[in-house]
Amino acid sequence: MRASLIAGLIAVALVSQVGAQGVAGNGVLTGVERLNIHGCRKGRTSVVVSVAVAADGTWQAVETTHAYQGTYTPRGKGNRVLAFTFDDPSRALYTSVLNAWADDLCGVPVTVTSATQQKAVFTLNKRRTKGSLAVVYRFTGVANGRSGRAKLTLAGKGSWQALP
């Protein structure tokens, strides 16, 4: 398993607001997700996520086996940068997906005890037709009675289609 929900949540950043007018739309994000756990194998996987963003500030992202949702906030000059948050059920699902991926990489059961978003931004080009993203999450957890740290990163890009 992989922690592709981050990709889904990040993909939400494929939308922005133009002045006071909200922009709804959908798109596809492709990228690479990496999970580095101190003392375990490194994980790397390609991800493809379908994203839908509503003008009311909510989003939904669907990858092969999981669906996530939450809210977004435009930031920065020109509102071409989007910061996202995800709702509690999506956060819980994210943790379970991460646990499964960590179990596989470490070869033993791992329990994630904390997850902190360090960076989650998506920047649209000036025409608002394409974007690039950068995400970093840091985790702590326990495996075989030992505490450890992990870092999940995602980098990707995709196209965006605004809805009328």
Image (cartoon, grey):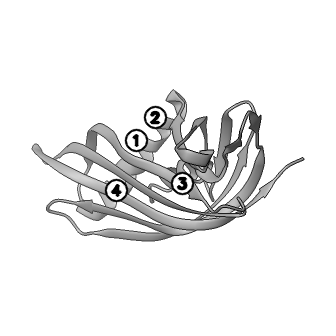
Residue denoted by label 2 = 92
Counting from the top left corner in percent of width and height, residue 4 is at 50, 56
State left or right for residue 135 relative to residue 5. left
The numbered mark at residue 95 is 1
Regarding residue 47, the answer to whether it shows in the image is no
Regarding residue 56, the answer to whether it shows in the image is yes
Counting residues from the N terminus, which is met first, the one under dot 1 or under dot 4? 1
- Cα distance, mark 3 to mark 2? 23 Å
Which residue is at a point 15% across and 49% down the rendered structure image?
A: 148
- Which element carries disc 1, helix, strand or loop? helix
Counting residues from the N terminus, which is met first, the one under dot 3 or under dot 2? 2
Q: Amino acid at mark 1?
A: Thr
State left or right for residue 112 relative to residue 121. left
The numbered mark at residue 152 is 4
* Quadrant hosting residue 53: top right
- Cα distance, mark 1 to mark 3? 22 Å
Kindly check if marks 4 and 3 are in contact, taking CB atoms under 8 A apart as contact: no
Residue denoted by label 3 = 122
Tag nearer the camera, 4 or 3: 3
Counting residues from the N terminus, which is met first, the one under dot 4 or under dot 3? 3
Tag nearer the camera, 3 or 2: 3
